[in-house]
Image (tube, rainbow, N blue to C red):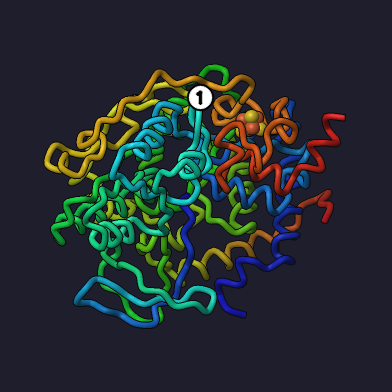
C-alpha cells in the first residue's frame, strides 16, 4: 500500500503543481504539491499519483560508499 | 551502471549477506537464541519473501511481520461498513485495488459487485474525484485506507473536490498512523523482539525523529529501511550491530528519501484535514489516537457522516490467525488454514488477500518450505 516508486522528472508544470515523470520507460503525469518545486532530471518517489519526497542522489552515493566500507572490513571466521 | 541500479547489485548483496551471517551468529551467542526482528511495512514483507531472505537466514535470525499492511489491519467493523456503502442506492464505491476482495463478516466488495453493487478501482483518489465530476448522478464514496504515506493524497482529493465544487464526492476515512501501533506492540509483555525494520515511505512523511521513543522509552534498536534487498540487508546489519553493542538508536538507512523531520507539507495537510481518533486495529483492538477522522470543517466530505450506513455486529470467521500474525506472534505457516482452507483464490482473512499481506507473500514465495514444514 505504501509502495513508492522512483520516477525521473522529464517535464515540469509549475502553474498546476504537476510534473511528467518517467518510470520504467513509461511517462505519467503526477502531482508535485507535496514536494514543492521540482526540476527536470530530479527523481521523485511517487505514491498513488503524488510525489511524496525527492530522491537525493548524493545520499544514495553516500550509502553505496558506506557499503563499500563495510565490505572492506574482513571478519574472522567469515563464511562467504 | 546507473546509480540506482547499484542498489540491486547481486554481488554486493551476497557480500552483505555474508556480513549479516557473521553478526547474526555473534548475536545468537550473546542472546542465547536467534535475534528476532519485525518489519512494519507490507512492502518490506513482500521484499523479504521475494528475496527468500527468511530461508537464507533460517536458524540464524528470525524475521516477523507486524501491523504494516493497511488493508490487513483494517477491522471487520470497518470492512462491513465499506461493504454497506456498496449496498446503498445511487452510491458508487471507489477504492484501491487491494481492498476489493477482503472478506468482511459475511461478504466482500467483490461479492457485492457480483450482486450488482457499483465498485470501481482507482490508482489515485484524484481519479475518483474526476469520476465523480463526470458522473453527477451518482454519489462517489472513496475508501480511505492507508497510513501516513497515503493520507495526504486522500486529504488532497477532498481539497480538489472542494475547489472544483464536486459535491457528490466523499471519503470514508479508515486511515491510520503507525507510531501508536508501535507503542501498542512495545507495551505488550508477550512480545519478544530485538528490533524493528521501520517503514521507508511512512517515514518519508513523518521523519526519522518521530521514532525516537522506540529507543528512548523502550530501549529497542530500529532502522528505517528502503525497499531493495540491499536496503533490507543493510537494515539487518545495523540492527545486529546495535544488538551486539547493547545500543538502541533509530538509524536512518534510507537517507536518500527520509529526512530527520519528514515532509513538512504533508504533515501540515494531515493536521489541517484530520483529527487523531481512537480506532480498532485487527488483532490489537482499540489503539488510542491511531486513526485519522475528518475535522469538523470537512464533515461535508465525510462519507460516514453523509450516509451513516447501518452495520450489524461483526462476525469473525473461525480459525484465521491474521490478528495474531499482525502482532508478530506467529508466522503464516503456523496458521492451520494456511494453504489448505485459505489460499489467494479462497482467502479467509485479509493477510491472504492483500498483495502485501504476509500470508499472500508466504503463499507466493515461501510455500514450499511451509508445506514441507507441516508434513
Ligand atoms: S493463512 Fe488465511 S486464515 Fe490463516 S492467518 Fe493468514 S489469512 Fe488468516
Can residue A73 be seen here? The reply is: yes
Residue B290 % position (x, y): 34, 32
Question: On what subunit does the disc labeled 1 rest?
Answer: B
Relative vertical location of residue B87 with respect to residue B43 in this rendering, above or below: above
x and y, in percent, of residue B308 in the image: 25, 30
Q: Which quadrant is home to the C terminus of chain A?
A: bottom right
Q: Nearer the viewer, residue B56 or B247?
A: B56
Residue drawn at 58 percent across, 78 percent down = B2
Between B203 and B12, the one lying in front of the other is B203
**Image-based side of B134 in relation to B283, left or right:** left
Q: Which residue is mark 1?
A: B283
Q: Number of marks in the image?
A: 1
Give B190 or B87, whichever is nearer the viewer: B87
Secondary structure beneath dot 1 equals: loop
Q: Can you tell which quarter of the image residue B217 is in?
A: top left
Q: Position of residue B201 (x, y in %)?
A: 44, 53
Above or below residue B85? Residue A54 is: below
Q: Is residue B198 visible?
A: no
Q: Quadrant of ligand 1?
A: top right
Residue displayed at 68% across by 38% down = B343
Amino acid at each position: 500500500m505504501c509502495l513508492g516508486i522512483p520516477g525521473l522528472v522529464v517535464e515540469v508544470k509549475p502553474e498546476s503543481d504537476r510534473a511528467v515523470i518517467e518510470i520504467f520507460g513509461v511517462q505519467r503525469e503526477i502531482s508535485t504539491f507535496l514536494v514543492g518545486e521540482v526540476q527536470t532530471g530530479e527523481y521523485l518517489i511517487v505514491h498513488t499519483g503524488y510525489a511524496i519526497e525527492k530522491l537525493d542522489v548524493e545520499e544514495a552515493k553516500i550509502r553505496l560508499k558506506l557499503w563499500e566500507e563495510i565490505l572492506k572490513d574482513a571478519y574472522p571466521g567469515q563464511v562467504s | 551502471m546507473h546509480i540506482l541500479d547499484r542498489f540491486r547489485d547481486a554481488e554486493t548483496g551476497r557480500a552483505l549477506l555474508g556480513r549479516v551471517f557473521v553478526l547474526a551468529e555473534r548475536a545468537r551467542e550473546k542472546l542465547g537464541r536467534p535475534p528476532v526482528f519485525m518489519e512494519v511495512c507490507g512492502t518490506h514483507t513482500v521484499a523479504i519473501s521475494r528475496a527468500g531472505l527468511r530461508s537464507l537466514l533460517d536458524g540464524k535470525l528470525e524475521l516477523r511481520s507486524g501491523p504494516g499492511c493497511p488493508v490487513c489491519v483494517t477491522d471487520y467493523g470497518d470492512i462491513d461498513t465499506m461493504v454497506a456503502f456498496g449496498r446503498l442506492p445511487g452510491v458508487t464505491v471507489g477504492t484501491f485495488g487491494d481492498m476489493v476482495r477482503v472478506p468482511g463478516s459475511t461478504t466482500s466488495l467483490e461479492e457485492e459487485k457480483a450482486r450488482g453493487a457499483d465498485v470501481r478501482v482507482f490508482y489515485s483518489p484524484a481519479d475518483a474525484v474526476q469520476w465523480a465530476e463526470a458522473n453527477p448522478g451518482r454519489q462517489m464514496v472513496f475508501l480511505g485506507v492507508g497510513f501516513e504515506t497515503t493520507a495526504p493524497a486522500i486529504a488532497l482529493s477532498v481539497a480538489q473536490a472542494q475547489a472544483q465544487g464536486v459535491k457528490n464526492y466523499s471519503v470514508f476515512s479508515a486511515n491510520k498512523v503507525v507510531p501508536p501501533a508501535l507503542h501498542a506492540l512495545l507495551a505488550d509483555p508477550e512480545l519478544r523482539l530485538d528490533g524493528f525494520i521501520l517503514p521507508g515511505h511512512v517515514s518519508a512523511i513523518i521523519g526519522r525523529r518521530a521514532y525516537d521513543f522506540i529507543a528512548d522509552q523502550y530501549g529497542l534498536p530500529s532502522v528505517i529501511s528502503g525497499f531493495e534487498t540491499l536496503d533490507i540487508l543493510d537494515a539487518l546489519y545495523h540492527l545486529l550491530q546495535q544488538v551486539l553493542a547493547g545500543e538502541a538508536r533509530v538509524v536512518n538507512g534510507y537517507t536518500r528519501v527520509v529526512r530527520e523531520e519528514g515532509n513538512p507539507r504533508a504533515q501540515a495537510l494531515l493536521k489541517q484535514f484530520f483529527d487523531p481518533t481512537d480506532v480498532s486495529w485487527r488483532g490489537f483492538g482499540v489503539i488510542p489516537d491511531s486513526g485519522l477522522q475528518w475535522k469538523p470543517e470537512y464533515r461535508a466530505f465525510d462519507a460516514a457522516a453523509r450516509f451513516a450506513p447501518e452495520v450489524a455486529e461483526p462476525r469473525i470467521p473461525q480459525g484465521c490467525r491474521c490478528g495474531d500474525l499482525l502482532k508478530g506472534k506467529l508466522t503464516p505457516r503456523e496458521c492451520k488454514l494456511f494453504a489448505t482452507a485459505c489460499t489467494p483464490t479462497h482467502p479467509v482473512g485479509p493477510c491472504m488477500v492483500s498483495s502485501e499481506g504476509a500470508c499472500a507473500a508466504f503463499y507466493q514465495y515461501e510455500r514450499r518450505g511451509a508445506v514441507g514444514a507441516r508434513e
